[in-house]
């Protein structure tokens, strides 16, 4: 509960408490109505917050479903370490769906010099099929991107994992329709109505721990397509790409090859809240190469089963 | 900060997108990269001005056809409140989208072009808002700049609408003369309309009193999920998790569990952050009961002297959402609070014309976007309140058992 005491006398609920209550409600619905839910957990801030809400929804019982990470094999080591420590602390079961394995077994073909990010869709759908998951929690938010702004909390996927934006089920009141045939599944987005600022305010309020790369730190980076990419095992600057060392942080955390850093001195959650409140560029616009392909890049990826 | 959800209805011609664009822009909620993307697309399409509708029309098909197909959700905040906008298309073939957006709204915002007055679609939007019991309705009389900011025009639209609205049940009705394009009375009071003494639209959205719109009288707690940890530390724990649907629940309260009708007390109201003394809508909490009863998902906890109606016969207004028409005799799956059952349509009493409010009593079917009064018989008893009294225990959806599509949205009427 976010706020009690004086506020309760008028029976008003603070906006973060209202958002939390809605997310808890959604997670309990899924746990009650589905046989094999799974929660996508990357160690990114939205999935960390989603897992915290899952903890709360079922307390004092443990989270009644496993978490799954679709690992491109090109992730930030700091984030992987954080992922492992978190699942260890909570005692939840971690499933890893490996893009490297999909490449090795020939399910997908890697193109040299191109991010593995789009390959994740196949790995994700294969894992959903293999384990028979019928509900898959994702941390997507409607404020992130305009195709997501149109997506339901319960997003139906056919047996190919496809999203059809033109025939979505109407979603009324808090009555969610999770019915599906065998082989189909529902993507569930309990954070649909949260904004980036809400996420950070909640992280501050709940003192939620995040991977260190969300906070300002010194790092060697280089500029490519207007983004600051980290120098690492999977990303090396070309001959005419200049290396600079500067103070940066990450607003989103994805694959190292397509997630850009932003120059920032925000070292604490309070600093970040101030920065997010003043920022003029969306987090995906600022830091995600994968969304820059076209106006409908996200819609196109989502149609084929992306997160 | 409080959260206010509002639904907007109208078409591009009414200036709805311009209005939303202005609200977002003036509250600094449009980001530069979003605006750049919209400007770029506008230029490529050869639009004469930056088409702010592109901000909300997020799907490829919408941009290609220049129409809004689906509900889009937008978010903005001021220092006073957080807002969620459900932006719904206004055209008659998208009635179901407006019904969807209105179902969770605290407030509905309807745009009227000052030059045209009340059109058929304004009447339709108002009827839907009233049917869905959206507690507050705001009529924005837009394009006042095109009628020389004339008070007489505004007054005449207001009188005409009041006359029509007398036939509807609308709790709180507010009129604001605006120019979305020029920003008059949107965020700031307009100097061009000194005769208007009310608040700007944003000011009204920030200040409108919504706390008493919830039902805080009739205690209703649909059990959603039973929490029974299998661990030594919590060996005897048994909690009933759910979202409070009405009233205020207090520790120590005498309660009754439906359908069994057994009475007990609330031993504790748990949250992961510790127990609380009381819980009210829309809190998600876990109740522990003083006695060891058989309680499961779909049961409902209420007060002994204030119980919902327990019935298998449901009278309701139904909005049809699917291509395949509804006909008397058909059987559907029904979801009502956390309860699932099957329902047969026993009778279609009439179909209502959403433009004229005329009742067609010889109608034999409801097709997509049509609204009518039906009688249902359910396989299990439901615990219902009138929709006008409680939007949660008074609403349900129907699901086609073959296609799994959500096909109907129902609002329960008094049995009488």
Image (cartoon, coloured by chain):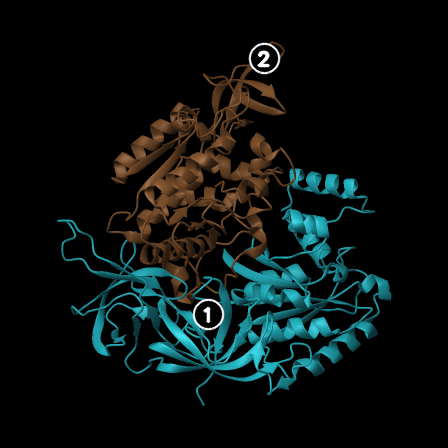
* Quarter of the figure with residue A107: top left
For residue A225, which numbered disc appears in the image? Answer: none
Give the number of marks.
Answer: 2
Q: Residue furthest bottom?
A: B416
Q: Chain letter of disc 1?
A: B
Q: Position of residue B97 (x, y in %)?
A: 59, 63
For residue A238, which numbered disc appears in the image? Answer: 2
Q: Residue at x 49, y 78 (%)?
A: B388
* CB-based contact (under 8 Å), mark 2 and mark 1: no
Query: What color is chain B drawn in?
Result: cyan
Instruction: Check disc 1 and report its element: helix, strand or loop.
Output: strand
Q: Position of residue B175 (x, y in %)?
A: 69, 71
* Quarter of the figure with residue A75: top left
Q: Which chain is brown?
A: A
- Which image quarter is the N terminus of chain A in? bottom left
Q: Is residue B402 left or right of residue B61?
A: left
Q: Position of residue B402 (x, y in %)?
A: 44, 64
Q: Position of residue B125 (x, y in %)?
A: 65, 71
* Residue A159 shows in the view: yes
Q: Residue at x 47, y 45 (%)?
A: A160
What crowding class fits label 2: few (fewer than 14 Cα within 10 Å), some (14-19), or many (20 or more)?
A: few
* Residue B187 shows in the view: no
Residue B159 lies, with reference to residue A184, above or below; the image says below
Between residue A248 and residue B375, name the one nearer to us. B375
């Amino acid at each position: 509960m976010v706020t009690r005491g004086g506020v309760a006398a008028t029976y008003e609920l603070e906006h973060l408490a209202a958002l939390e209550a809605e997310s808890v409600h959604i997670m309990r619905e899924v746990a009650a109505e589905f046989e094999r839910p799974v929660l996508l957990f990357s160690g990114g801030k939205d999935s960390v917050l989603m897992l915290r809400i899952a903890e709360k929804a079922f307390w004092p019982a443990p989270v009644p479903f496993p978490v799954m990470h679709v690992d491109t094999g090109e992730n930030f080591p700091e984030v992987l370490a954080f992922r492992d420590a978190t699942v260890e602390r909570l005692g939840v079961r971690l499933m890893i769906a490996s893009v490297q394995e999909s490449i090795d077994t020939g399910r997908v073909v890697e193109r040299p010099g191109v991010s593995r990010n789009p390959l994740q869709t196949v790995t994700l759908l294969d894992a959903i099929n293999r384990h028979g998951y019928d509900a898959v929690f994702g941390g997507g938010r409607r404020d992130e991107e305009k195709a997501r702004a149109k997506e339901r909390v319960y997003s139906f996927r056919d047996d190919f994992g496809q999203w059809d934006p033109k025939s979505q089920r109407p979603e009324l009141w808090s009555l969610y329709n999770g019915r599906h045939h065998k082989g189909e599944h529902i993507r569930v987005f309990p954070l649909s109505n949260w904004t980036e600022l809400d996420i950070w305010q909640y992280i501050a309020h709940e003192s939620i721990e995040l991977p260190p790369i969300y906070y300002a730190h010194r790092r060697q980076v280089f500029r490519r397509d207007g983004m600051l990419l980290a120098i690492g095992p999977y990303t090396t600057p070309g001959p005419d790409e200049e290396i600079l060392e500067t103070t940066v942080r990450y607003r989103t955390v994805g694959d190292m090859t397509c997630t850009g850093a932003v120059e920032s001195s925000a070292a604490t959650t309070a600093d970040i809240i101030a920065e997010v409140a003043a920022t003029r560029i969306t987090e995906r616009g600022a830091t995600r190469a994968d969304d820059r392909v076209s106006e409908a890049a996200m819609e196109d990826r989502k149609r084929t089963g992306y997160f | 900060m409080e959260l206010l959800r509002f639904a907007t209805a109208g078409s591009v011609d009414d200036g709805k997108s311009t209005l939303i664009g202005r609200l977002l822009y003036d509250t600094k909620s449009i980001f530069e990269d979003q605006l750049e993307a919209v400007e770029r697309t506008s230029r490529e399409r050869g639009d004469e001005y930056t088409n702010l509708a592109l901000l909300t029309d997020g799907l490829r098909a919408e941009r290609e056809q220049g129409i809004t197909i689906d509900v889009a959700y937008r978010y903005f905040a001021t220092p006073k409140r957080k807002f969620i906008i459900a932006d719904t298309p206004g055209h008659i073939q998208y009635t179901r989208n407006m019904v969807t957006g209105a179902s969770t709204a605290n407030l509905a915002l309807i745009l009227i072009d000052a030059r045209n007055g009340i059109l058929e679609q304004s009447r339709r939007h108002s009827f839907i808002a009233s049917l869905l019991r959206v507690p507050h309705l705001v009529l924005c009389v837009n394009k006042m700049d095109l009628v020389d900011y004339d008070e007489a025009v505004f007054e005449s639209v207001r009188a005409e609408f009041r006359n029509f609205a007398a036939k509807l049940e609308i709790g709180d009705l507010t009129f604001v003369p605006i120019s979305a394009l020029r920003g008059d009375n949107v965020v700031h009071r307009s100097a061009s309309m000194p005769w208007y003494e009310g608040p700007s639209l944003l000011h009204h959205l920030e200040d409108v009193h919504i706390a008493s719109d919830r039902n805080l009288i009739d205690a209703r707690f649909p059990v959603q999920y039973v929490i029974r940890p299998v661990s030594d530390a919590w060996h005897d724990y048994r909690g009933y998790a759910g979202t409070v649907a009405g009233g205020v629940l207090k520790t120590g309260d005498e309660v009754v569990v439906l359908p069994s009708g057994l009475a007990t007390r609330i031993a504790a109201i748990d949250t992961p952050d510790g127990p609380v003394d009381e819980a009210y809508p829309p809190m998600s909490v876990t109740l522990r009961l003083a006695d060891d009863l058989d309680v499961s998902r779909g049961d409902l906890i209420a007060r002994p002297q204030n119980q919902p109606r327990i019935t298998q016969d449901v009278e309701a207004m139904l909005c049809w959402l699917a291509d395949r028409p509804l006909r008397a005799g058909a059987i559907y799956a029904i979801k009502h609070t956390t309860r699932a059952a099957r329902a047969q349509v026993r009778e279609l009493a009439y179909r209502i014309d959403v433009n004229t409010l005329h009742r067609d009593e010889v109608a034999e079917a409801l097709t997509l976007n049509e609204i009518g009064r039906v009688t249902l018989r359910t396989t299990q008893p439901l615990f219902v309140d009138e929709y006008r009294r409680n939007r949660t225990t008074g609403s349900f959806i129907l699901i086609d058992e073959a296609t799994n599509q959500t096909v109907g949205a129902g609002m329960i009427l008094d049995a009488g």
